[in-house]
Each structure stands twice: as structure tokens, then as C-alpha cells.
């Protein structure tokens, strides 16, 4: 028996959806802001990100093998969804909602907990709690990256 409760968190950013989605689509840069990943890459780096693209992820848990995901939904500047290549119960979704002057970034992680109710309870009080904390921290870091203006004098503009 498997149980699955998705982790869903969001953050409002002072940025247009194009800029935020552009950063999300830079797969090799995911470990910079997704703290629970050690590495991320497109399986075929020379091809553009699109439906059917394969993404290879390695979590930051020592000894954890690489996991293969496939892009199953892709809507430019709105949605990027990956599903586990060998387990359709593993899913990572990034959705961007345009607001009047801001954008809302919503991230959803689904992964199964095998072994019934006891295994699910153990997962909830150990790994899932750590992953939830890491995801919240990662979204704060993403917010900082996407809102940062890359102008030479931007750092001292308030002084």
C-alpha cells in the first residue's frame, strides 16, 4: 500500500512571469536554489526543454542514486511539470500565476511512501518534514534570485 500527500508551497515575487519561468527552465541551476538537490541536468543538453525532455536529478541525500524524470506538461511562462520516468507517482510541478504587478510561484512535490500507514507516519515526521522545510527555504532563495536586478549600481541605489 502506498500513500501520498503532496507538498505544495508558493511565494509571491516582484517579477514578470517570463523572468521567473526562464530561471525555472534553467535546469542545471536548480541546485543553486533547490537545496534538496545535489545535481540537475537535461539528459540531452543540446536539445531545448520541451514535452518529452528527460531531466536527471540527484538529491542531496548521500548515496542516493540519480532519478530520471520526463517533462509531461510544458506551457511557456506558466507550467513545467515533470513525472518520474520509472514511477509515475513521483512528480514535480512548477506553476506561475500572473498577478497585477507580481507573479505567484507554486511548487508541488509528489512522492510515494510505501509500507502502509505506519511507513507514511514515519515519513511524515522525518523525511517529509525536512523536505518541506527545504522547499520553503528554496522558494525564499528563488525569490531573491528572480528579484535581483543585475545592474552594476543596483546594490547601492538606496544610499
Image (cartoon, helix red, strand yellow):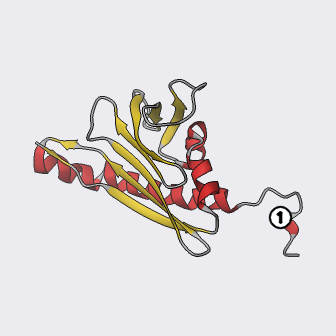
- Establish if 33 lies above or below 156: above
Q: Measuring from the top left, give residue 76's x and y in whole percent.
A: 53, 49
Residue ID for mark 1 = 155
- Establish if 102 lies above or below 65: below
Residue at screen point 46% across, 64% down? 10
Q: Measuring from the top left, give residue 146's x and y in whole percent.
A: 65, 58
Q: Measuring from the top left, give residue 136's x and y in whole percent.
A: 47, 60
Residue 64 vs residue 156, the one in the foreground: 156
Please tell me how crowded label 1 is: few (under 14), some (14-19), or many (20+) other residues with Cα within 10 Å: few
Residue at screen point 37% across, 59% down? 8
Residue 13 vs residue 117, the one in the foreground: 13
The total number of labels drawn is: 1
| Quadrant assignment for the C terminus | bottom right
Residue 128 vs residue 41, the one in the foreground: 41
Residue at screen point 57% across, 52% down? 21
Residue at screen point 57% across, 32% down? 48
Secondary structure beneath label 1: helix
| Quadrant assignment for the N terminus | top left
Q: Quadrant of residue 46?
A: top right
Q: Is residue 69 left or right of residue 90?
A: right
Q: Measuring from the top left, give residue 141's x and y in whole percent.
A: 59, 57
Amino acid at each position: 500500500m502506498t500513500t501520498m500527500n503532496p507538498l505544495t508551497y508558493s511565494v509571491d515575487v516582484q517579477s514578470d512571469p517570463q523572468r521567473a519561468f526562464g530561471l525555472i527552465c534553467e535546469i542545471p541551476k536548480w541546485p543553486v536554489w533547490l537545496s534538496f538537490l545535489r545535481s540537475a541536468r537535461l539528459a540531452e543538453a543540446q536539445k531545448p526543454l520541451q514535452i518529452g525532455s528527460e531531466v536527471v536529478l540527484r538529491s542531496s541525500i548521500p548515496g542516493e542514486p540519480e532519478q530520471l524524470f520526463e517533462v509531461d506538461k510544458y506551457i511557456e511562462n506558466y507550467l513545467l511539470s515533470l513525472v518520474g520516468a520509472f514511477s509515475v507517482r513521483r512528480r514535480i510541478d512548477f506553476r506561475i500565476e500572473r498577478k497585477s504587478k507580481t507573479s505567484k510561484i507554486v511548487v508541488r512535490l509528489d512522492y510515494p511512501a510505501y509500507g502502509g500507514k505506519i511507513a507514511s507516519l514515519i515519513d511524515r515526521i522525518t523525511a517529509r518534514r525536512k523536505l518541506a522545510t527545504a522547499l520553503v527555504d528554496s522558494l525564499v532563495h528563488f525569490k531573491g534570485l528572480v528579484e535581483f536586478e543585475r545592474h552594476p549600481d543596483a546594490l547601492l541605489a538606496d544610499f
